[in-house]
Image (cartoon, grey):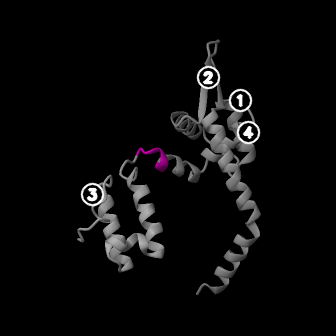
């Protein structure tokens, strides 16, 4: 392993330094020159960013990004952006909007708890008989929904281009 200024960066973990050395090796540049290589600078920046949290499975950047890819969390957040709902009503709204036409009570509860844990959703219990439980977006959840809506606008604006690329790919596939 090269021992120079790039591989000995302060603040990087040992694993981060190994990643930088591996990037330099793949790009066939000295580790010290990684930041001067067109792709190397971008990839080294990505490795440095990932090093801040990549070793922690519970890091918000990992879990919240994964939430964008799960089947239900994004839809739950989008529905809650319309207002505050009780569990059963939320379940019916999600069923009405989703392609699956149903979400199990257990799955909805799991997703709501994860979103509550991340500070995106607030659960309010009103001490009545039976207890009333309402779910609403927090300010943080509202900010996140704004980002999701921006991504949805981008996807909608580029829908035709994506479909054309898929069609071209399928036509050229062996």
Task: Tell me which segment is drawn in magenta.
Answer: 58-62
Residue 76 in sight:
no
Disc 1 + disc 4, Cβ < 8 Å: no
Identify which residue is drawn at 55% across, 48% down: 67
* Circle on res. 84: 1
Q: Which residue is mark 4?
A: 93
62 or 134: which is nearer to us? 62
Dividing the picture into quadrants, the one containing residue 162 is: bottom right
110 or 19: which is nearer to us? 19
Position above or below: 132 against 72: above
Query: Left or right of 2: which side holds 59?
Result: right
Q: Which residue is mark 2?
A: 124
Assess disc 2: are there few (<14), some (14-19) or many (≥20) residues with their C-alpha within 10 Å of its C-alpha: few
Quadrant of image for the C terminus: bottom right
Give the Cα separation between the discs numbered 4 and 3.
Answer: 48 Å
| Mark nearer the viewer, 1 or 3 | 3
Disc 4 + disc 2, Cβ < 8 Å: no
Give the mark, 1 or 3, whose residue is nearer the N terminus: 3
Identify which residue is drawn at 27% across, 61% down: 8
Q: Which residue is mark 3?
A: 14
Label 3: which secondary element: helix
Assess disc 3: are there few (<14), some (14-19) or many (≥20) residues with their C-alpha within 10 Å of its C-alpha: few
Disc 1 + disc 2, Cβ < 8 Å: yes
Position above or below: 26 against 63: below
The mark tally for this picture is: 4
Residue 164 in sight:
yes
Give the mark, 1 or 4, whose residue is nearer the N terminus: 1
Give the Cα separation between the discs numbered 1 and 2.
Answer: 10 Å
């Amino acid at each position: 392993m090269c021992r120079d200024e790039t591989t000995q960066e302060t603040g990087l973990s040992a694993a981060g330094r190994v990643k930088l050395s591996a990037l330099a090796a793949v790009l066939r540049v000295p580790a010290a020159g990684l930041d001067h290589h067109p792709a190397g600078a971008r990839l080294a920046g990505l490795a440095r960013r990932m090093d801040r949290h990549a070793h922690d499975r519970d890091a918000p950047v990992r879990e919240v990004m994964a939430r964008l890819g799960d089947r239900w969390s994004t839809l739950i957040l989008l529905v809650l952006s319309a207002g505050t709902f009780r569990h059963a009503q939320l379940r019916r709204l999600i069923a009405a909007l989703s392609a699956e036409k149903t979400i199990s009570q257990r799955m909805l509860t799991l997703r709501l708890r994860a979103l509550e844990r991340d500070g995106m959703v607030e659960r309010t219990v009103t001490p009545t008989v039976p207890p009333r439980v309402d779910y609403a977006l927090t300010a943080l959840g509202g900010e996140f929904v704004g980002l999701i809506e921006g991504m949805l606008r981008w996807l909608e604006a580029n829908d035709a281009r994506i479909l054309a690329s898929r069609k071209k790919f399928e036509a050229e596939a062996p």
